[in-house]
Image (cartoon, rainbow, N blue to C red):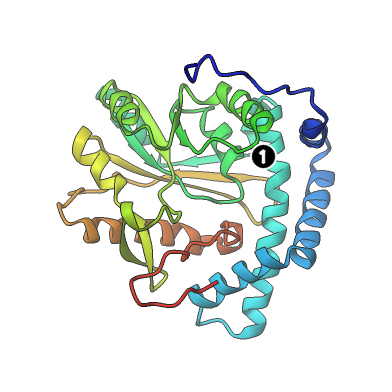
Amino acid sequence: MTRDESPQPNFAHPRYWPVWLAIGAMYVAAWLPWRLKLWIGKLIGLAAWRFAKRRRHITETNIRLCFPELDEAQQARLVRETFIANGIGIMETATGWCRDPEHLRHRVTFKGQQHMARVQAEGRGALIIGVHFSTLDLGAALHALYFRADAVQRPHDNPVFDRFMARARAPYFDEVLDRHDLRGVVRRIKAGYAVWYSPDQDFGRDVSVFAPFFGIDAASIKLTAKIARMTGAPVMPLIFHRNPDNRTYTLEYLPPLEDFPSGDELADATRVNAVIEQAIRKHPEQYLWLHRRFKTRPQGEPKLY
C-alpha cells in the first residue's frame, strides 16, 4: 500500500473530540470583541504561567541566559509578560485562521514594502526570514493583504488539527511546503515566488552550526545560506509585532541581506541570528521563549534545561 493509499483516520472518533472542541472554540474566539479577546488571552497566558511548570522553567532559563543585564525581578516580569503575550497570541492565531484578515487592514502599519515590491518588479523569487513571535499566524494573514508567499511548516502531529491548520492557512499562502522539502522550496523560489520560513529554532546538530544568539552558542540551521546559494534569491527579513496599544500591528521588511551568502557557514548563521535578535529585542515579550532554543549543546557542554 502506498502512502497516498494508506487509510485515513476516522476524524469522528471520540479520541478527536477534544480537538474538534478546541477548533470550535477558535472559531468562536475569532469573532469576539477585541477587548474581550485580549482579556481572555491574558487569562490563558496567566494560567499557563502559573500551571505549565515545564514551559515556565524553559522560559525562565531562556530569559536568564539571554538577558543577563536584567536583575531577577526584571527577568521574572519578562517571563510573566511572555506568557501573557503568547496567551493573547492564541486569540490572534484564531483570528488569523478563522476570519478574513481584511477586517484588520486598518490596524496595520506596513513599513519597508518597497523592498519586496522591488524584488517582485524584477520577477525574482525571495526567501523571507520570519520569526516565531506570538503574532506569527496573524502576521502571516496580514502580510497576505499586501504580498503573496509560500510557507514552510512542520506538519502537526494530530491529523485533525493538521488538516484544520492547513485549510486555515491556505487562503493566505500560495503553497505550504514541508520543512524537509528543500527541492520544493528551491523550485518555487526559482519560479519567482517568495517563500517564508523561520530559521530561529533548534533543528539539531546535523543541520546546524553553533552561532551566537543573544551571546549564547545556539544550534543555528545552515539552510538559509544554502537556499540563497542554490537560488541566487535575496534574503528578506520580515518582522512583525503587536504595538503597545494592543490594538494595532506593525509589519516591516528590512532591506535584503547584502553579500549573502558569504561562503562561510558560521558567519552566515551568525548574521541571520543577529537580524533575528535585533527584531526580538524590540518587543522581547512577544517572542516564543517557551521553546528550547538552546536544546542542542556543543560537545562537552551540559544541558541547559
Q: Is residue 26 left or right of residue 160?
A: right
Q: Is residue 114 left or right of residue 103?
A: left
Q: Is residue 160 visible?
A: yes
Location of the C terminus (image quadrant): bottom right
Q: Quadrant of residue 63?
A: bottom right
Q: Residue at x 65, y 57 (%)?
A: 244
Name the outermost residue toward the left.
263
| Mark 1 residue type | Thr
Q: Residue at x 79, y 34 (%)?
A: 15
Q: Position of residue 78 (x, y in %)?
A: 64, 70
Question: How many discs mark residues in the rendered view?
Answer: 1
Q: Nearer the viewer, residue 166 or 6?
A: 6
Name the outermost residue toward the bottom.
71
Q: Is residue 270 left or right of residue 46?
A: left
Q: Residue at x 43, y 53 (%)?
A: 200
Q: Position of residue 80 (x, y in %)?
A: 70, 68
Q: Residue 219, relative to residue 76: is it above or below?
A: above
Tell me the element at label 1. helix
Which class describes the residues within 10 Å of circle 1: few (<14), some (14-19), or many (20+)? many
Q: Is residue 245 visible?
A: no
Q: Label 1 belongs to which residue? A: 93
Q: Position of residue 212 (x, y in %)?
A: 34, 68
Q: Residue 141, relative to residue 288: is it above or below?
A: above
Q: Quadrant of residue 148?
A: top left
Q: Residue 30, relative to residue 214: is it above or below?
A: above
Q: Quadrant of residue 272?
A: bottom left
Name the outermost residue toward the front.
1
Q: Is residue 89 left or right of residue 28?
A: left
Q: Nearer the viewer, residue 34 or 111?
A: 34
Q: Position of residue 199 (x, y in %)?
A: 40, 49
